[in-house]
Image (cartoon, rainbow, N blue to C red):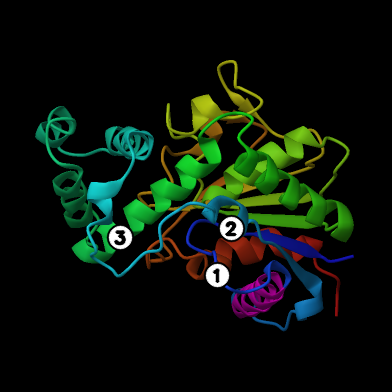
Amino acid sequence: MSLIVGVHGVGNHVRGRAPEDVAAQRAGVWARNLAAGLGRPLAESEVAFAYYGHHLSRGLPVAQGPDDGALEHLTPHEAALAAHWLEALDLPRATAQGRLAMPLRHAVEMVAKRFSLDGRLTRAFVALCFREVAAYLSAPDAPARLAAREEVAAVIAERRPRVVIAHSLGTVVTYEALHAHPELTVDLLITLGSPLALPHGVFHRLRPAPAERGVRPAGVARWVNVSDHGDPVAVLRPLASYFDGVDLDLEESVRLFDFHRAAGYLRSPAVAAALEPHLPRR
């Protein structure tokens, strides 16, 4: 058993390493970040990690650098998902009207300026993000989607955690995994920087398909969502406006957006406060 199972977001695939080795290394990193936020030690054995990145990486190109023209080489499906994301952002009116006419690179540059981000790194992140999102959401029964979902479900079934913490695309994989396996029960689901509500790009592609609103998985006793107000991936907000069963929807200013890494969220007071009641007393 583990107290916590973590589920990663985009950009976590490590080529050439065994998945179990990557999972063990990431579990240690998450344990240290969570401990920093809690202000007390958290044993690495208390945190397990559901690593699914290798399932989505098959066939994807290897990134060559922070500005290698990757945006220009997105597939039509990948570019369409990026366009849905741009549409959901509250960009200036002229930008929104012209988003389909202008090159994706220019639109992403406007996003970088809007959120005070480095342009080159933002372009690289967007290319990586939507390649992995597209690999997962390409079809309801896509092999990569089923493999990633079942990987997460298997780790939760094996570790039987009290808490599952999912970040970014991992919130989508975890949401579907817990719905697909209602026999899996957790006391607390924490979603961080979640794109679950992104219309057309994510929300309308979820399984089970939302009627009008998404719903909390049956085995989850409590759902806490945390999003940074400067996180352009966590659209739309608040998540509780789109999903029934979100018990607490927190918008923090954790200054985390180092290209959507989880560390800032894991160290945040909001996550520490949500976790504290579920930790053993020492």
**In the rendered structure, which amino acid carries the disc numbered 3?**
Ala
Which residue lies under the disc numbered 2? 53
Distance, label 2 to label 3, CA atoms, is: 18 Å
Q: Earlier in the sequence, mark 2 or mark 1?
A: 1
Task: Report the amino acid beneath label 2.
Answer: Gly
Q: Is residue 248 visible?
A: no
Within the magenta stretch, is there residue 30? Answer: yes
Quadrant of the image occupied by residue 15? bottom right
Q: 186 or 79, which lies in front?
A: 79
Q: How far apart are marks 2 and 1 (CA)?
A: 8 Å
The range drawn in magenta is: 21-36
| Residue at point 44%, 34% (across, down) | 198
The residue at the point 51 percent across, 47 percent down is 194
N-terminal-most mark, 1 or 3: 1
Q: In this view, does 141 lie to the left or right of 197?
A: right
Q: Choose mark 1 or mark 3, whichever is in front.
A: 1
Write the residue at 18% across / 30% down.
Answer: 100
Determine if residue 6 is in view. yes
Q: Position of residue 170 (x, y in %)?
A: 59, 51
Seen in the picture, residue 258 relative to 85 is either above or below; the reply is: below
Measure the C-alpha gap from mark 1 to mark 3: 17 Å
Crowding at mark 2 (Cα within 10 Å: few <14, some 14-19, many 20+):
many
Q: Residue at x 37, y 40 (%)?
A: 78
Q: Is residue 157 above or below residue 199?
A: below
Q: Quadrant of the N terminus?
A: bottom right
Q: Name the residue under label 3.
A: 124
The amino acid at mark 1 is Val
Badge 1 element: loop
- Point out the tag, 2 or 3, that comes first from the N-terminus: 2
Residue 180, image x, y percentages = 76, 34
Quadrant in which the C terminus appears? bottom right
Mark 2 and mark 1 in contact? Answer it, CB < 8 Å: yes
